[in-house]
Image (spheres, rainbow, N blue to C red):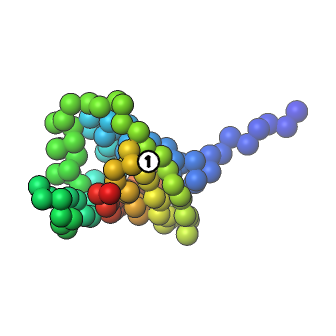
Amino acid sequence: MAQADETVSDYDLIKTTIGHYFDGLRLADRARLERAFAVEYAHMKGYIKDANGKLVESSRAMNEVIDEWVAREPNPALKGSIVSINIYSDIAAQATFDFNGVYTDAFQLAKINGEWRIMSKFYVNQ
């Protein structure tokens, strides 16, 4: 009897990484967030609405952002979905994620020591 192929595709591994990001954010779970990001290298950049509704630029180190996210109350009701994944080499990919219809996230991912990690998150507040 032939044994089933137990290898997991890079596409599935990237989906898992993005799942760690989203579940970590929803549940204020540092361990999951740190599994998603290459924390020592990652940054979050993007456009967020200020108090007047104007989009303003933002750039922060991911370790600082994770500290803020885990200090929040968990919100398991948040919704999100992967829009696209583009793997363009054996160590580099990008993905787009719809966060609750409020933010669009673009992730740049790198395979580090065999695991996909988010190196950069660019977002736009819709």
Q: Position of residue 23 (x, y in %)?
A: 38, 37
Compare residues 123 and 40 and report the one nearer the observer: 123
Amino acid found under the numbered disc labelled 1: Ile
Q: Position of residue 2 (x, y in %)?
A: 85, 37
**Residue most extreme to the left:** 51
- The quadrant where residue 20 appears: top left
Q: Position of residue 116 (x, y in %)?
A: 46, 54
Q: Position of residue 45 (x, y in %)?
A: 26, 64
Q: Secondary structure at mark 1?
A: helix
- Judge left or right: residue 103 versus residue 112: left
Tell me what residue is drawn at x 21 percent, y 65 percent. 55
Tell me what residue is drawn at x 51 percent, y 54 percent. 83
Relative height, residue 103 to residue 68 (above, below): below
Q: Quadrant of the C terminus?
A: bottom left
Tell me what residue is drawn at x 26 percent, y 34 percent. 28
Q: Quadrant of the N terminus?
A: top right
- The quadrant where residue 75 appears: top left
